[in-house]
Image (tube, grey):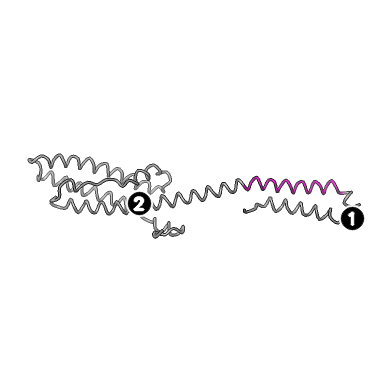
Amino acid sequence: MRRGWEFWLGASFVVAAMALVAPAYFLPDWRAIVSSIGAATAAFAVVGASLIAYDGALAKVRFDRSIQMIDRDLRRRQILTKLDFTARLIILDTRQVRDAIGVFGEAPPDDFDLNEPTDMADLWNRIGELPKDKAAAVAFARLNYSQYKRLLAGYRQMCADPMRNGSQVAAQRRRELAGITIKIADAAKEMAAGNAVTLAAEGLSEAD
């Protein structure tokens, strides 16, 4: 356990007091000198012992603080790793859905499903632990997920109507859906930006 300055100062006081008293057992002349300064020597030793006791009390505080710092660092690495993984997953998902939407919309609406990764809820609950730019990116991504869900629900209804399916309005809805996937992907890129560098600098590489 790392000792504070109080321990070493107190130990030096105690050792100094003992160094003054010890020779008195062997040297009569020194015994007379120690007798004359006995009270001061005892006070010196008491102060030293008090400093050692004080350091012992502070040692618990220092230990708890170090545990808190380790826990904080681990939580930060955990959330940055989760943020990076979630962002990369979003980029892959949005690319797949955008390809399914296509220009002419040959794929059925069921292929357009785009759901938030499950870790997004945890990131949202811990958004206060994220840097401001990452928190803003998470919020922007969630907003666009919500918009995409509502727009897709309307597009499904449109496709169920033979009179409206294949119309210019339906094509416009597909373009809007594709545009939202781009916004979500851009937010994910912002979520992932710099995470690998930060984790590597803190000793946690992507391979970990």
Residue 198 shown left or right of residue 92 in the figure: right
* Amino acid identity at mark 1: Trp
* Amino acid identity at mark 2: Met
Residue 47 shown left or right of residue 130 in the figure: right
Residue 30's disc number: 1
Between disc 1 and disc 2, whose residue precedes? 1
Other-residue count near label 1 (Cα within 10 Å), few / some / many at <14 / 14–19 / ≥20: some
Residue situated in front as seen by the camera: 157 or 178: 157
> Quadrant of the image for the C terminus?
bottom left
Residue 181 shown left or right of residue 38 in the figure: left
Residue 53 belongs to the span the image colors magenta = yes
Disc 1 versus disc 2: distance between alpha carbons?
Answer: 75 Å
Q: Residue at x 89, y 49 (%)?
A: 35
Residue situated in front as seen by the camera: 173 or 61: 61
Residue 22 percent location from the top left of the image: 84, 55
Please state the extent of the stretch shown in magenta in the rendering. 37-59
